[in-house]
Image (cartoon, rainbow, N blue to C red):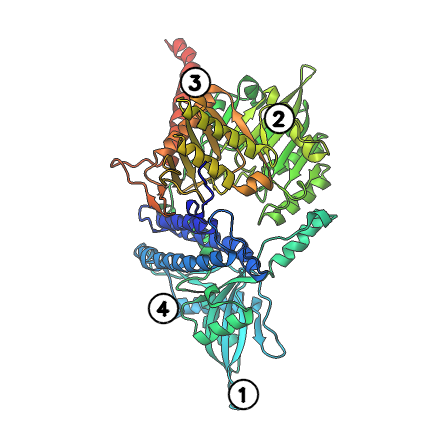
Amino acid sequence: MKDFSIPDYYINRELSWIAFNERVLAEAANPDNPLFERLKFIAIASSNFDEFFMVRVAGLKDQVKAGFTKPDNKSGMTPGEQLQAVWERTHHVLRSMYAILKNEITPDLQRAGIRFVKAEQLSCEQEQFVHQFFHHHLYPVLTPMAVDASHPFPMLLNKSLNLAVLLEDDDPESEGPLFAVVQVPAVVPRFLELPSPDGEAHFILLEDVIALYMDTLFRGYNILEASPFRITRNADLTIDEDETEDLLEAIEQELKKRKMGEPSRLAVAASMSDFLKETLQDWLELSAFEIFRLDGPLDPSFYFRFHALAGYDHLRFEPLTSQHPLDLLDEEDIFAAIQKKDILLHHPYESFDPIIQFVQEAAVDPNVLAIKQTLYRVSGDSPIVNALLKAADNGKQVTVLLELKARFDEENNIVWAKKLENAGCHVIYGVAGLKTHSKITLVVRVEDNQLRRYVHLSTGNYNDKTAGTYTDIGMLTSREEFGIDASNFFNHLSGYSHPPAWREISTAPIGMRESFLALIEKELENSLAGKPAFIIAKMNSLTDKQIIEALYRASCAGVKIDLIVRGICCLRPGLPEVSANIRVISIVGRYLEHSRIYVFCNGGNPQVYLSSADWMTRNMIARVEILFPVVQDDLKARVIHYLEVMLKDDAKASMLLPDGTYIRVQPESPFPLNSQLFFWEEAFRLNQSREKAFSAQRLKPITALLE
C-alpha cells in the first residue's frame, strides 16, 4: 500500500492560514469592490493577523521556548522551522497589505473626497477644531508614563495602541534622552472628523492628535520623537479543567491574565527611529523578526467602524435583505409547519428570524414543557437567550449547554451564563477537556396527550448578528429518530451515561471521524467495483491527517473529489499518483463561508450530511460536534444544488495548486458567476414567484365578484 505520510504531500497549517489571509487581501485590492468594503477587508485581514499572533504564533513560541523540537505530523516542520517560515511570510504579506492601503485604496478615497490628514496638513480652521477637541475631550483622559529607574516599563495591555516618546530635559546637566509612553485611549473614537471643504470629508487619527500636542503632556521637556507602537500578546487560555472546581471562576481569572500575556509581536511606525525601536525591542525581549515596521495605521481594524459611517451608502455593497425561507412562505404556525415536513434554511439568503421565532414561541407556548439548547457564540443582546430567560420565567424546563471556552467570546458567554442561572435555567459548562461546538435545539411539546419533539440542527451558531454575514444551513425536523437522538445527546452531556447508539446523527469525539472514514472508504470500494463514485465536501478548514490520507487513497482509486475549503487546507491537490482526482477551491466574498456540507455518491443514491464540524483534528478529537443527515429528497437535492453552484463560481473562487499557492479561477464568460449573489437572487426570485402564486389565489374570488 502506498505511503501517504510523506511530508511533501502536505501543506503546513500555519502557512496555509497565511495564504487564506492573502485571499482576503485580494478582495481589498479588488477595484470591483466598493471602497468602504475594501477598507473592511483590510480590517478583517488585520484582525485575523491579531488572532493568529495571539494564538498560533504564541503557541509556536511557547514550544520553542520549552525546547520542543518534534516535527508536526503532516509537513514535518519543527516549531522553530514553522516560526521562522511564519515570520518571513507575514512580513511579506503585511508589507503587501500596507502597500494596497497606501498605493491603491488611499488614492481612490482621495478621489472620492475622503482624506486622512496629518497634523502638518491641517487648515487653520481644522487646527482650531483639533485644539479644542484635544484640550476639552482628550487631554483629561491621557496618562503620560515616564520610564526610568523608579518607573519600570509599564505592562501595556494586549492590542493597545501607544506612543513611544523620546524626551530631552532643558537642564543642560541632564544625562541623555528620557523615555516615556502615552497610551491612546480606547474609550475615545480612533478617528476624528474635521471641518472640511464642500464635497470633501477630512479625518485625523487619534494618535496623530496626541503626537501634535505631546509637549502639553511633558512641559519643560523637548520632544525629540513621538511614534506609535502596538504589542500583540499571547492570549490563549490555559486551564486545567480536571483540577478546577469552578470553571466559570477559573476562566474569569484567565481572562485577566490574557491581557498581560507574553509579547508575540511588536508593530511600530515605519518612521520610528532605530534607537526607539531597539529600546522597545530590548524591554519587550523580542527578536528582530518579531518587529514589524508598518507604513500606515498600526491597527487598521478601526476601519470596521469607519465602514459604518452614515452618508456613504454608495461606497458600500448594496444592502441585500434576507428572504423569507421558501419552506415557510405559506406557514403561520412554525410547529405545524415542521410537523408536515423537514424544513431547510440557507442563511443569510434566507432569514434567521424563523429560528428566533421557533425559540420565542416555544418560550410562551403552554404546550411546551422543555427547551434544551447548545450555545457557542451568541450576540451581545441575543433574542435567543432572552427567549430562554422568558421560558424559564414561564416555568419551562430550560437546559443550556453554554460553552465558556469559545475563544474570544468567553466574557460575553460568562455574562449570559450568570443571567441564565439566575433565571432558573440549568446551565452546563460543557465537558471537561472538550469544547462543545455542536449547534442543536430540542423543544419538547405536548400534543394530543403525547410528547412530540422538535429539533433544530445547524452548521452555524445561534447568533442573530453573524447570521446576516455568515453562510450557514440549518434544518428543522420533528422526525422521531432525530428527537430521540437529541434527547440522548443532551442527557449524555448533562449526566454520566455512556455514549448512546445514535439513530441518525454521529458525534465527535467518539464516532464522527470513523463515520467519515467509512463513507470515504465506501466511495473507494464503489469506484473499484465500477460503480459511480464521487465526494463533494465544503468546510472552513481541512487539517486532519487520517481524513486526508483516506481522500488520497480514494483519489488513487478513481474517486472524483471536489473540496470547497474556505481557509486552511493541508491537503495538496493534483499530485500524480496521490491526489490527481482532487480539486480544491476557496470562495472569499462579501459573506463569510461557514457552512459544512458533505455529500457522498453512494453508488448513485447520494448521501447528504451537514455538520458543525470541519475536517480538522481538533473537531474530531477535542470538540463535541454533530454530523446529521438530510433525509428528505427535495432538501437533499437543494443542498447538492448549492454545492454545484459554488463549484461553478468563477467570480470569487480561487483554486489551490499542488505547490500550496492559489490562483483565481478564470471566468468562462463575460458574466462571471458569483455564487453568493446567485443564491440571494435565487431566494428573491423564488419568494416573488411563490408570493405571486398565493396572491393570485387570494385575489381570484374578489375578481369574480367584480365581474
Q: Which residue is mark 4?
A: 121
Residue 445, compared with residue 666, is above or below; it is: above
Neighbours of disc 4 within 10 Å: few (<14), some (14-19), many (20+): few
Rounded to the nearest whole Å, what is the CA distance between mark 4 and mark 1? 34 Å
**In the picture, residue 90 is in which quadrant?**
bottom left
On residue 694, the disc is 3
Other-residue count near label 2 (Cα within 10 Å), few / some / many at <14 / 14–19 / ≥20: some
In the picture as drawn, the residue positioned furthest to the bottom comes out as 173
For marks 3 and 2, the one nearer the N-term is 2
**Amino acid found under the numbered disc labelled 1:** Ser
The secondary element bearing badge 2 is classed as: loop
> What amino acid is found at the position of numbered circle 4 in the picture?
Gln
Q: Which mark is residue 174?
A: 1
Q: Quadrant of the C terminus?
A: top left
| Residue 356, horizontal then vertical, whole percent | 57, 32
The residue at 73%/37% (across/down) is: 424
